[in-house]
Structures are given as C-alpha cells and as structure tokens.
Amino acid sequence: MSVSLTVEKREVRPRSLRNKLRHEGKVPAIINGYQVESTPVAVSAAELEKILRDHGANTVITMDVDGKKVNTLIKETQADTFTRTLTHVEFLSVNMSEETEVEAEILLVGESVGAKSGGVVAQNLYSVVVSATPDKLPERIEVDITDLAIGDALTVADLPKVDDYTIVTDGEEQIVAIMEPQAEEVADEEAGEAAQPEVIGEKEAE
C-alpha cells in the first residue's frame, strides 16, 4: 500500500527559510536514495502527520519530484523537544522490487492466564527489525500472550513465520515473560512492617 504526499522544492540557504516554512505549516525535508539525487523539499505538516497517524511510519509515500514519481519511506524524523512537532524529515527513495530493513513495533495482545492468576507481564523487547519489499513492510507485529502462564516466555524465534517479511532480529531475543510477583509481595510486606509504630515500653515489659 502507498499514499501520496505533495512536496515542493525548497532553497537550503539562508537557514531562516526553515523557520519561515515551519511558520507556514510546512516541514523542511530531504529526499535521497534510489535513482534520486539529494533533493531538499518541503511538505505539509498536517498532511504528513495524518499519514503517520493513519498508516504508520513504514508505509510507502509516493511523491512527484520534477514530474517523476518517487516511492519513499521515512528514514528519520526530528521533532521539537517540547511540542513534539516535526521539524525535519529525511525520506529514502526505494526500489519497490528490492527488500529493505525497518523496525516494526511489537504489540502484545490478549490477557495471559499467568497475569489472571497474579503474575506480572514483563515486556523486554518493543520492536524487531524486519526485511521485505517496501509494499509488504509491517507497521507492527501482534504477539498473542493469552496462553502464557507464570514462568512462560516468548522469544523472537517463537513469532510465526509469514510470507510477506523476514524477521532479522536474533531469534534468542526475549520478547515477553510472565513473572511471579514475589518481588512485589516482599516489598509490600517490608513496607507494611516499616509502617508499624513501635510501642514505647514494650521491650521493657518483655
């Protein structure tokens, strides 16, 4: 799947032009990669944010650059520290018939039987690297933890194999484990003991 994004070429100098673009609701960006010379452009902030919100960062974004259709992926974004608004984006032009590698989010789904019986769900890995042609790249991979009991764990190697993409991340990497709540119980007991007031004279009475 791909979506379209309107771009316009921009000047690089002076630097103040970047601030001017941002005030106009545009994001300075650059396109480079497959069959494209490094090209500074500007895109609509609202349009790009809608694409990210509706389709995610791994979707193919098609642009018209000097009358040429260019398929791109978002390679890197920069955002304001406080407002989190986009301040710069790097687009990577891609060959739709060649595989590329990106990170895909891991999303845990379901409530594990271990958690229902008091266990603690500990997620240790939040994304994996996948390889696929640009049109097959997943935004996220859902991991069903419903059948996990206390003491059970899932690794990358346990993820189901699919035809659309290959998982590159080491198979021994642990994604999630259902832990016994011992540490929490001990901490609660210690906190309860510390909260009990000492009775003056009690030791002397003994």
Image (cartoon, grey):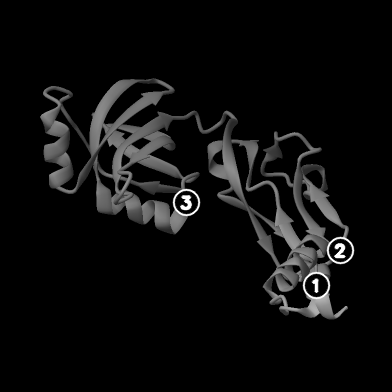
Viewed as shown, does residue 48 lie left or right of 167?
Answer: left
- Expressed as whole percent of the image width and height from the top left, the position of residue 2 reads 44, 47
Amino acid on which disc 3 is placed: Gly
Q: CA distance from mark 3 to mark 2?
A: 33 Å
Residue 145 visible in image: no
How many marks can you see?
Answer: 3
- Expressed as whole percent of the image width and height from the top left, the position of residue 130 reads 64, 38
Count residues near mark 3 (Cα–Cα under 10 Å), then give few for <14, some for 14-19, many for 20+.
some
Viewed as shown, does residue 74 lie left or right of 120?
Answer: left
Q: CA distance from mark 2 to mark 1?
A: 8 Å
Question: Which residue is at the front of the view, 92 or 180?
Answer: 180
Q: Secondary structure at mark 3?
A: loop
Q: Name the residue located 59 percent from the left edge and 51 percent from the top edge.
A: 140
- Expressed as whole percent of the image width and height from the top left, the position of residue 56 reads 47, 51
Tell whether label 2 touches label 3 (CB within 8 Å): no
Tell whether label 1 touches label 2 (CB within 8 Å): yes
Question: Which residue is at the front of the view, 132 or 200?
Answer: 200
Q: Secondary structure at mark 2?
A: loop
Disc assigned to residue 118: 1
Disc assigned to residue 109: none
Q: Is residue 108 positioned above or below 23 on the image?
A: below
Residue denoted by label 2? 150
- Expressed as whole percent of the image width and height from the top left, the position of residue 68 reads 30, 30
Q: Secondary structure at mark 1?
A: loop
Viewed as shown, does residue 94 lie left or right of 199?
Answer: left
Question: Which residue is at the front of the view, 150 or 181?
Answer: 181
Residue denoted by label 3? 56
Q: Name the residue located 75 percent from the left edge and 71 percent from the top edge.
A: 193
N-terminal label among 2 and 1 = 1
Q: Is residue 153 positioned above or below 188 on the image?
A: above
